[in-house]
Protein backbone atom coordinates (compact mmCIF):
# COMPACT_ATOMS: atom_id res chain seq x y z
CA UNK A 1 0.00 0.00 0.00
CA UNK A 2 1.41 3.38 -1.01
CA UNK A 3 2.28 5.53 1.97
CA UNK A 4 1.22 8.82 0.38
CA UNK A 5 -2.12 10.42 -0.45
CA UNK A 6 -3.76 12.18 -3.36
CA UNK A 7 -3.05 15.41 -1.52
CA UNK A 8 0.66 14.51 -1.47
CA UNK A 9 0.59 13.96 -5.23
CA UNK A 10 -1.15 17.30 -5.78
CA UNK A 11 1.31 19.13 -3.52
CA UNK A 12 4.32 17.62 -5.28
CA UNK A 13 2.94 18.42 -8.70
CA UNK A 14 2.47 22.04 -7.63
CA UNK A 15 6.04 22.17 -6.30
CA UNK A 16 7.67 20.60 -9.36
CA UNK A 17 5.27 21.09 -12.28
CA UNK A 18 5.94 17.43 -13.19
CA UNK A 19 3.28 15.14 -14.65
CA UNK A 20 1.07 12.99 -12.44
CA UNK A 21 2.61 9.66 -13.42
CA UNK A 22 6.15 11.00 -12.92
CA UNK A 23 5.18 12.23 -9.46
CA UNK A 24 3.53 8.93 -8.51
CA UNK A 25 6.51 6.90 -9.70
CA UNK A 26 8.90 9.14 -7.77
CA UNK A 27 6.82 8.88 -4.61
CA UNK A 28 6.65 5.10 -4.97
CA UNK A 29 10.41 4.88 -5.37
CA UNK A 30 10.99 7.32 -2.50
CA UNK A 31 8.58 5.44 -0.23
CA UNK A 32 6.46 8.58 0.16
CA UNK A 33 9.35 10.94 1.02
CA UNK A 34 8.53 14.15 -0.84
CA UNK A 35 12.05 15.61 -0.74
CA UNK A 36 13.58 12.38 -2.01
CA UNK A 37 10.92 12.23 -4.71
CA UNK A 38 11.90 15.72 -5.90
CA UNK A 39 15.52 14.56 -6.16
CA UNK A 40 14.45 11.56 -8.23
CA UNK A 41 12.35 13.72 -10.54
CA UNK A 42 15.29 16.07 -11.06
CA UNK A 43 17.79 13.24 -11.69
CA UNK A 44 15.53 11.46 -14.15
CA UNK A 45 14.75 14.74 -15.84
CA UNK A 46 18.42 15.58 -16.35
CA UNK A 47 19.04 12.14 -17.82
CA UNK A 48 16.29 12.81 -20.35
CA UNK A 49 17.48 16.31 -21.25
CA UNK A 50 19.39 15.15 -24.33
CA UNK A 51 16.32 13.32 -25.65
CA UNK A 52 14.31 16.55 -25.30
CA UNK A 53 16.76 18.71 -27.28
CA UNK A 54 14.93 18.32 -30.57
CA UNK A 55 11.46 18.91 -29.20
CA UNK A 56 9.37 21.92 -30.18
CA UNK A 57 8.90 24.69 -27.62
CA UNK A 58 5.90 26.61 -28.91
CA UNK A 59 4.34 27.46 -25.54
CA UNK A 60 5.56 29.68 -22.74
CA UNK A 61 5.26 33.23 -21.52
CA UNK A 62 6.51 36.79 -21.80
CA UNK A 63 7.47 38.78 -18.70
CA UNK A 64 8.65 42.37 -18.35
CA UNK A 65 9.68 44.97 -15.81
CA UNK A 66 10.29 48.72 -15.94
CA UNK A 67 12.96 50.17 -13.65
CA UNK A 68 12.56 53.79 -12.47
CA UNK A 69 10.25 54.47 -15.40
CA UNK A 70 13.21 54.73 -17.78
CA UNK A 71 14.51 51.21 -18.44
CA UNK A 72 12.39 48.31 -19.62
CA UNK A 73 13.48 44.67 -19.65
CA UNK A 74 11.48 41.87 -21.30
CA UNK A 75 12.09 38.14 -21.66
CA UNK A 76 10.43 35.21 -23.42
CA UNK A 77 10.71 31.74 -21.91
CA UNK A 78 9.41 28.75 -23.86
CA UNK A 79 8.30 25.23 -22.98
CA UNK A 80 6.52 22.39 -24.77
CA UNK A 81 2.97 22.41 -23.38
CA UNK A 82 0.45 24.91 -22.04
CA UNK A 83 0.12 22.71 -18.94
CA UNK A 84 3.70 23.54 -17.96
CA UNK A 85 3.41 27.16 -19.18
CA UNK A 86 0.76 27.90 -16.56
CA UNK A 87 2.39 25.90 -13.75
CA UNK A 88 3.67 27.73 -10.68
CA UNK A 89 7.13 26.19 -11.13
CA UNK A 90 7.52 27.48 -14.69
CA UNK A 91 6.24 30.95 -13.79
CA UNK A 92 8.67 31.01 -10.86
CA UNK A 93 11.52 30.13 -13.24
CA UNK A 94 10.49 32.91 -15.63
CA UNK A 95 10.46 35.37 -12.72
CA UNK A 96 14.02 34.30 -11.89
CA UNK A 97 15.11 34.75 -15.52
CA UNK A 98 13.61 38.25 -15.55
CA UNK A 99 15.29 39.14 -12.25
CA UNK A 100 18.67 38.02 -13.60
CA UNK A 101 18.08 39.97 -16.82
CA UNK A 102 17.32 43.12 -14.81
CA UNK A 103 20.25 42.73 -12.44
CA UNK A 104 22.84 41.72 -15.03
CA UNK A 105 21.88 44.29 -17.65
CA UNK A 106 22.18 41.56 -20.30
CA UNK A 107 21.00 42.71 -23.73
CA UNK A 108 21.37 39.39 -25.59
CA UNK A 109 20.69 35.73 -24.88
CA UNK A 110 24.33 34.69 -24.64
CA UNK A 111 25.05 37.25 -21.93
CA UNK A 112 21.84 36.43 -20.10
CA UNK A 113 22.43 32.67 -19.99
CA UNK A 114 25.99 33.26 -18.79
CA UNK A 115 24.88 35.63 -16.00
CA UNK A 116 25.00 34.51 -12.37
CA UNK A 117 21.90 32.92 -10.85
CA UNK A 118 22.19 31.28 -7.42
CA UNK A 119 25.95 30.93 -7.83
CA UNK A 120 25.85 29.28 -11.27
CA UNK A 121 25.19 30.34 -14.88
CA UNK A 122 21.52 30.99 -15.54
CA UNK A 123 21.66 28.54 -18.46
CA UNK A 124 22.47 25.71 -16.03
CA UNK A 125 19.58 26.71 -13.78
CA UNK A 126 17.19 26.63 -16.75
CA UNK A 127 18.35 23.12 -17.73
CA UNK A 128 17.94 21.88 -14.15
CA UNK A 129 14.48 23.36 -13.79
CA UNK A 130 13.49 21.93 -17.16
CA UNK A 131 14.57 18.53 -15.84
CA UNK A 132 12.15 18.87 -12.93
CA UNK A 133 9.36 20.01 -15.24
CA UNK A 134 10.08 17.13 -17.62
CA UNK A 135 10.05 19.37 -20.69
CA UNK A 136 12.49 21.25 -22.85
CA UNK A 137 12.67 24.81 -21.50
CA UNK A 138 14.33 27.59 -23.48
CA UNK A 139 15.03 31.24 -22.75
CA UNK A 140 14.37 32.45 -26.27
CA UNK A 141 15.08 36.16 -26.18
CA UNK A 142 15.60 39.27 -24.09
CA UNK A 143 15.06 42.96 -24.86
CA UNK A 144 16.27 46.06 -23.05
CA UNK A 145 14.76 49.44 -23.89
CA UNK A 146 15.74 52.81 -22.44
CA UNK A 147 14.16 56.25 -22.68
CA UNK A 148 12.94 59.21 -20.66
CA UNK A 149 9.66 57.34 -20.27
CA UNK A 150 9.26 53.60 -20.83
CA UNK A 151 6.06 51.56 -20.54
CA UNK A 152 5.64 47.79 -20.52
CA UNK A 153 2.40 46.14 -21.56
CA UNK A 154 1.65 42.43 -21.20
CA UNK A 155 -1.34 40.78 -22.86
CA UNK A 156 -2.97 37.40 -22.23
CA UNK A 157 -4.24 35.65 -25.34
CA UNK A 158 -5.99 33.14 -23.06
CA UNK A 159 -7.32 33.82 -19.57
CA UNK A 160 -5.96 30.44 -18.42
CA UNK A 161 -2.37 31.15 -19.47
CA UNK A 162 0.30 33.69 -18.51
CA UNK A 163 0.90 36.66 -20.81
CA UNK A 164 1.97 35.59 -24.29
CA UNK A 165 2.40 39.03 -25.84
CA UNK A 166 4.61 41.76 -24.44
CA UNK A 167 5.64 45.25 -25.55
CA UNK A 168 8.22 47.77 -24.34
CA UNK A 169 7.80 51.28 -25.72
CA UNK A 170 9.94 54.35 -25.04
CA UNK A 171 9.45 58.07 -25.71
CA UNK A 172 11.65 61.11 -25.22
CA UNK A 173 9.24 63.03 -22.96
CA UNK A 174 8.38 62.93 -19.28
CA UNK A 175 5.28 63.42 -17.15
CA UNK A 176 1.74 62.07 -17.15
CA UNK A 177 0.98 62.89 -20.79
CA UNK A 178 4.17 61.19 -21.97
CA UNK A 179 3.39 58.08 -19.93
CA UNK A 180 -0.21 57.97 -21.16
CA UNK A 181 0.92 58.24 -24.77
CA UNK A 182 3.60 55.58 -24.26
CA UNK A 183 1.08 53.24 -22.66
CA UNK A 184 -1.53 53.73 -25.38
CA UNK A 185 1.02 53.00 -28.10
CA UNK A 186 2.33 49.95 -26.21
CA UNK A 187 -1.22 48.55 -26.08
CA UNK A 188 -1.68 49.38 -29.77
CA UNK A 189 1.58 47.58 -30.63
CA UNK A 190 0.48 44.45 -28.82
CA UNK A 191 -2.59 44.24 -31.05
CA UNK A 192 -1.19 45.44 -34.39
CA UNK A 193 2.25 43.78 -34.35
CA UNK A 194 4.45 46.35 -36.12
CA UNK A 195 7.70 45.03 -37.53
CA UNK A 196 9.58 48.34 -37.53
CA UNK A 197 9.40 51.60 -35.60
CA UNK A 198 10.12 53.94 -38.54
CA UNK A 199 10.25 53.74 -42.33
CA UNK A 200 13.99 54.28 -42.17
CA UNK A 201 14.41 50.95 -40.37
CA UNK A 202 12.85 48.95 -43.21
CA UNK A 203 15.67 47.35 -45.26
CA UNK A 204 16.17 49.03 -48.64
CA UNK A 205 15.90 45.71 -50.47
CA UNK A 206 12.51 45.07 -48.84
CA UNK A 207 11.24 48.45 -49.98
CA UNK A 208 12.55 47.98 -53.52
CA UNK A 209 11.01 44.52 -53.75
CA UNK A 210 7.65 45.86 -52.59
CA UNK A 211 7.94 48.73 -55.09
CA UNK A 212 8.66 46.24 -57.90
CA UNK A 213 5.65 44.09 -56.95
CA UNK A 214 3.41 47.17 -56.83
CA UNK A 215 4.64 48.29 -60.25
CA UNK A 216 4.22 44.86 -61.87
CA UNK A 217 0.76 44.45 -60.33
CA UNK A 218 -0.38 47.84 -61.59
CA UNK A 219 0.88 47.07 -65.11
CA UNK A 220 -0.83 43.66 -65.07
CA UNK A 221 -4.06 45.43 -64.10
CA UNK A 222 -3.71 47.63 -67.17
CA UNK A 223 -3.25 50.89 -65.28
CA UNK A 224 -2.24 53.85 -67.51
CA UNK A 225 1.48 54.57 -67.72
CA UNK A 226 1.00 58.18 -66.61
CA UNK A 227 -0.61 57.05 -63.34
CA UNK A 228 1.86 54.30 -62.45
CA UNK A 229 4.14 56.40 -60.24
CA UNK A 230 1.27 57.66 -58.11
CA UNK A 231 -0.31 54.22 -57.88
CA UNK A 232 2.95 52.53 -56.87
CA UNK A 233 3.69 55.15 -54.21
CA UNK A 234 0.16 54.79 -52.86
CA UNK A 235 0.52 51.03 -52.55
CA UNK A 236 3.95 51.43 -50.99
CA UNK A 237 2.45 53.77 -48.39
CA UNK A 238 -0.16 51.11 -47.68
CA UNK A 239 2.64 48.59 -47.14
CA UNK A 240 4.33 50.94 -44.65
CA UNK A 241 1.04 51.36 -42.77
CA UNK A 242 0.99 47.62 -42.18
CA UNK A 243 4.52 47.11 -40.87
CA UNK A 244 5.77 50.49 -39.54
CA UNK A 245 4.49 51.50 -36.11
CA UNK A 246 4.52 55.26 -36.65
CA UNK A 247 2.60 54.86 -39.92
CA UNK A 248 -0.08 52.53 -38.57
CA UNK A 249 -3.60 53.91 -38.02
CA UNK A 250 -3.91 54.35 -34.24
CA UNK A 251 -6.14 51.74 -32.61
CA UNK A 252 -8.16 54.27 -30.58
CA UNK A 253 -8.59 56.68 -33.49
CA UNK A 254 -7.86 55.14 -36.92
CA UNK A 255 -8.15 58.56 -38.58
CA UNK A 256 -4.79 59.42 -37.01
CA UNK A 257 -1.48 57.66 -37.38
CA UNK A 258 0.48 56.54 -34.32
CA UNK A 259 3.09 59.13 -35.25
CA UNK A 260 0.45 61.89 -35.26
CA UNK A 261 -0.84 60.82 -31.85
CA UNK A 262 2.66 61.01 -30.39
CA UNK A 263 3.24 64.38 -32.05
CA UNK A 264 0.06 65.74 -30.45
CA UNK A 265 1.29 64.45 -27.08
CA UNK A 266 4.55 66.36 -27.60
CA UNK A 267 6.81 63.30 -27.62
CA UNK A 268 8.84 61.24 -30.07
CA UNK A 269 9.15 57.46 -30.12
CA UNK A 270 12.68 56.29 -29.37
CA UNK A 271 12.38 52.50 -29.17
CA UNK A 272 9.94 49.60 -29.29
CA UNK A 273 10.26 45.86 -28.64
CA UNK A 274 7.46 43.33 -29.10
CA UNK A 275 7.45 39.62 -28.25
CA UNK A 276 4.77 37.05 -28.95
CA UNK A 277 5.36 33.53 -27.68
CA UNK A 278 6.50 31.29 -30.52
CA UNK A 279 6.32 34.03 -33.18
Image (cartoon, rainbow, N blue to C red):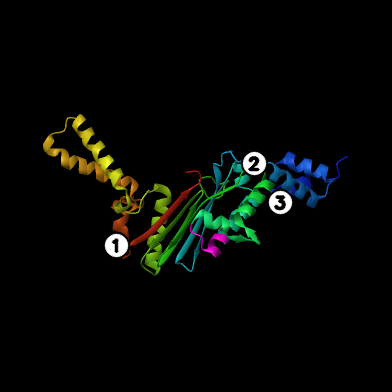
Tag 1, which secondary structure? helix
For residue 220, above or below residue 226: above
Measure how far apart labels 2 and 1 are at the Cα level: 55 Å
Image coordinates of residue 235 in percent, x first then y, are 24, 41
Residue 226 at least partly seen: yes
Tag 3, which secondary structure? helix
Residue hosting label 2: 50
Confirm or deny contact between disc 2 and disc 1 (CB under 8 A): no
Residue 18 at least partly seen: no
The residue sitting at 30% across, 56% down in the picture is 259
Tell me which secondary structure the magenta stretch mostly adopts: helix
For residue 171, above or below residue 57: below
Confirm or deny contact between disc 2 and disc 3 (CB under 8 A): no
Image coordinates of residue 206 in percent, x first then y, are 31, 43
Give the residues drawn in magenta, as a range.
100-107
Question: Foreground: 264 or 3?
Answer: 3
Residue hosting label 1: 264
Image coordinates of residue 200 in percent, x first then y, are 29, 53
Question: Foreground: 43 or 8?
Answer: 43
Amino acid sequence: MANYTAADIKALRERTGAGMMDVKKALDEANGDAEKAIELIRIKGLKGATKREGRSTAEGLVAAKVIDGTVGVMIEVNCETDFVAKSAKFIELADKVLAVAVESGAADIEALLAANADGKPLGDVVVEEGAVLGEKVVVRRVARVEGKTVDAYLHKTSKDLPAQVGVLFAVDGEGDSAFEAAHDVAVHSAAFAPTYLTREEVPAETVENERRIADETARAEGKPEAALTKIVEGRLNGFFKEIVLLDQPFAKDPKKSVGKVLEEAGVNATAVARFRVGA
